[in-house]
Image: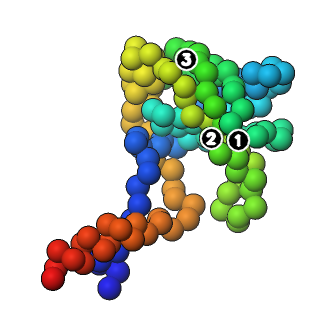
Amino acid sequence: MDDFLSTATDRHSIRRAARFSCEVVRERDFRRLAVRTLDISYDGMLVECDLPVLTGESVIFSLHLARLGAWIDGEGVVARVVHARRPLDGSRAVAIAFAGLDPATRELLRLGVRGYPPPLPAREPRIDFAATARNISLLA
């Protein structure tokens, strides 16, 4: 029966388990939130963070792509806060969605994360029930 179940994929780009040095500051008070990434994609990054942060807060970041010896600067928004309540969460973290990276910066980021493996999944994939129903209806 599991062969009919489709999993939901909300991501536009693949996450990479890459530990980069970074500086992430909250825009409203310029307090430093993070200095290391846990994973990164072309759309955003997950960073370790011990300060209380709200979803939707604006941040400014600098990201060091060590393999290229380059820094990427940009702005982002806190998309998710990981409170480390689940056993597999590890530490408290904040997901930052990049806001308006120009094409040259996006290409530099693509080159900088190329070759890093995806992170291990921390939970089971969600079931996309609409896609599952479509798959079953095609069998009839």
Dot 1: element: loop
Q: Quadrant of the C terminus?
A: bottom left
In the rendered structure, which disc, 2 or 1, sits on the residue that comes first in sequence? 1
The residue beneath circle 2 is: 79
Question: Which residue is farthest bottom?
Answer: 1
The residue beneath circle 1 is: 55
Mark 1 is surrounded, within 10 Å at the Cα level, by few (under 14), some (14 to 19) or many (20 or more) other residues, namely: few
In the rendered structure, which disc, 3 or 2, sits on the residue that comes first in sequence? 3
Instruction: Please report the residue visible at 76 percent of the width from the left and 26 percent of the height from the top.
Output: 26
Mark 1 vs mark 3, CA separation in Å: 23 Å
In the rendered structure, which disc, 1 or 3, sits on the residue that comes first in sequence? 1
Instruction: Please report the residue visible at 68 percent of the width from the left and 57 percent of the height from the top.
Output: 89
Per the rendering, the mark at residue 72 is 3
* Coordinates of residue 36 in the picture (x, y in percent): 67, 33
Residue type at mark 2: give it: Ala
* Coordinates of residue 38 in the picture (x, y in percent): 61, 41
Marks 2 and 1 in Cβ contact (< 8 Å): yes
Mark 2 is surrounded, within 10 Å at the Cα level, by few (under 14), some (14 to 19) or many (20 or more) other residues, namely: some
Q: Would residue 99 be visible to someone looking at this image?
A: yes
Q: Would residue 108 be visible to someone looking at this image?
A: no
* Coordinates of residue 31 in the picture (x, y in percent): 83, 24
Dot 2: element: strand
Mark 2 vs mark 1, CA separation in Å: 6 Å
Residue type at mark 1: give it: Thr
Q: Taking 18 as reference, is 127 left or right?
A: left
